[in-house]
Image (cartoon, coloured by chain):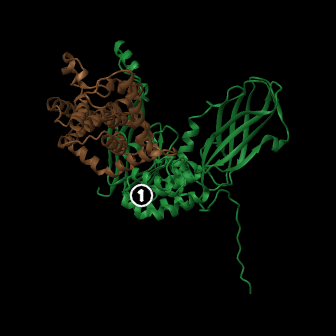
Chain colours: A green, B brown
Amino acid sequence: MSDLAIKMERVSKQYRLGQAGYRSLREDIVNIFKGRKEDSQCFYALREVSFELKRGETVGIIGPNGAGKSTILKLLAGVTIASSGAVMAKGKIGALIELSAGFHPELTGRENIYLYGSIIGMKKSYIDRRYAEIVEFSGLEKFIDTPVKRYSSGMYARLGFSVSAHLDPDILLVDEVLSVGDYAFQDKCINKMRGFRDSNKTIIYVSHNLDSVRKLCGRAILLKEGRVAYDGDVEGAIGRYYVNFSETQTGVRGSPEAVGLVGKRMTDSSGKPCTVIDSGERASFELNLKTVRELRGVYFAIFVRHSSGLVVFDTSSYLLHGVKYDYARNQELTLKYDLLINLLKGTYTIGCNIHGSTNGGPPECVFYENNIFAFIVKDNISHQGIANLNARCSIDLIQ
Amino acid sequence: MFEKIRELAEYRELLLTIAAREIKVRYKQSILGIFWSILQPLSMMIIFTIVFSRFVKVPSDGIPYPLFFYTALLPWTFFATSLSFAIPSLVSNSNLLSKIYFPREVFPIASILAAAVDFCIAAVIFLAILAFYKVVPNMNALYIIPILSIQVLLTLAVSLFASAVNVYYRDVKYALPFFIQLWMYLSPVIYPVSSVPDEFKSIYMLNPMAPIINGYRQALLIGTAPDFYHLAIAAFVTLIMLFLSYKYFKMVEMSFADRI
């Protein structure tokens, strides 16, 4: 058990809703006189969360907002304590926090390096030694004696990450810091993080940027409403994230004023409902819709999105048929798209938007839903990329 | 408790860095910069001297009023600035507090340290005023060391307690300026202790700042030993306050991040 770095055992964290923020004395005094106990409404940020990390492991934590990701980091950093359960973290902990938190806008880049460095736990002598390296990594040599309030937000973030990247802890907690700076700098950051990983540091990486989780982590934990919904390989967690995410939205959202989503169904080529499909198969996507108002000039668009956020396909009934339709109110209809899934292994979502005009007004988007279906594509050949271009390859020797 | 203090000692570098930040930031982009810490008490002294020795005749135990007043104003300003920066310090650093662990008392203590720098600079003016009035303190002046120590501990006690309460009740922030003002009038800053009616004196001197401020005058201007009896009470009260407020601070510290 000696190579265990982090252990969480049935950890719950409870916040009382009534006093999430600060109170004023008056409210409390009023409560005392009314003989009322504090608002007993509770909110669980985490419920019975258990997981372990071995030393040297890099684990991503993903999940929608409010799932409890940041609370886990706070517990590990020792900023707050669990309501119940045990949190164990072995070794020196370093946190790469929201970069701007430790900066002071009035101070120069140089002064902020020292300030931020000592806030995240560096000794002055250590910063002295690594100073040149930090400045070089940031690429801000020219501006280092300028107050950071004159920096652009990208420069700000670069300086911050450059300092924290030179931290030398046993356990590193990373909260959504890589989503800053330009593409080149992000790449630099990912490489730096890989360096951490390869030097056997334990890393917990929280991000909404699923692609960076994929690049960095060997394992991912999906949190949903404060519980661990999945703990295992990264693809599995990401896949589950999308499926979960779209399940919670069935028929609830949509544009209630104009068109409502009543039901949905994804089927494979044999007509059976599915969420996993083999690469190269056909799949059908059916939406049951109901108009709430009278609509004119309507057409239906769908788009297929890869989990990296890239739209891989986007089409509409107008592009396919060249016709727009008119509907009376309370008209029920079924929209069916049949697609050939020439996609490679990964997780994809399908969204839909409907255009038309209500009450003779200008054409507008009357329905928009990003994640109606989520499905996982399986394939047994390990091509890389998104699309299957049915490659053929020949090699001829020239005499 | 000793363990907590030892932990704080490990973070002394951070403490100094944050104190340095407060000082640097305070006068950035101001032309006069650090001279403000001289200018403020100096102009106060001039105004108060005009009001209280020309318009209203406030007794000053035979000491020239500017000297009499500045001797009290200087440590009082240190006390008041410390409180007004230390008490909101946890809330104004909430973004750090909710992200990174370190002993939270770093913030109020750093504010007191920053105020101490202002105090030291303004003390230079005090030496100039002494020279101007040709007052040469005797050996009793050394009593200001224990007196100042009691004052700093008292500042710390009040700051720790009030800054923690401020996290839960922002009322503290609004009450603070009023509270400091009130405390000044209850301490012998603009008037001498001799002006306090005898029947109130025993209660009056229970305010730790009363024997402290009075002690500076006795040690530096009159050249006598301070009022040991009341100073001892002040020291005793201060130590108990410090013990309780530090204990309270440490007790609620872990919930700051949830409540701020």
Left or right of A229, for residue A375:
right
Height in image: A195 above or below A51?
Answer: below
Height in image: B210 above or below B101?
Answer: above
| Closer-to-camera residue (B38/A205) | B38
Q: List the single residue furthest toward the right.
A: A322
Q: Quadrant of the C terminus of chain B?
A: top left
Quarter location, residue B185: top left
Classify mark 1: helix, strand or loop. loop
Which chain is mark 1 on? A
From this viewpoint, is residue A228 visible?
A: no
Q: Position of residue B164 (x, y in %)?
A: 34, 33
Quarter location, residue B139: top left
Q: Quadrant of the N terminus of chain B?
A: top left
Q: Residue at x 55, y 59 (%)?
A: A140
Height in image: A156 above or below B68?
Answer: below
Is disc 1 surrounded by few (<14), some (14 to 19) or many (20+) residues within 10 Å?
many
| Closer-to-camera residue (A362/B140) | B140
| Closer-to-camera residue (A182/A264) | A182
Height in image: B42 above or below A8?
Answer: above
Q: Position of residue B128 (x, y in %)?
A: 34, 43
From this viewpoint, is residue A210 visible?
A: yes
Residue that mark 1 sits on: A167
Q: Residue at x 22, y 17 (%)?
A: B197
Residue type (three-letter) at the residue carrying disc 1: Leu
Q: List the single residue furthest toward the left.
A: B229
Left or right of A165, for residue B56:
left
Q: List the single residue furthest toward the top.
A: A34
Q: Residue at x 53, y 44 (%)?
A: A241
Quarter location, residue B177: top left
Q: Position of residue A301 (x, y in %)?
A: 75, 40
Left or right of A382, for residue A318:
right
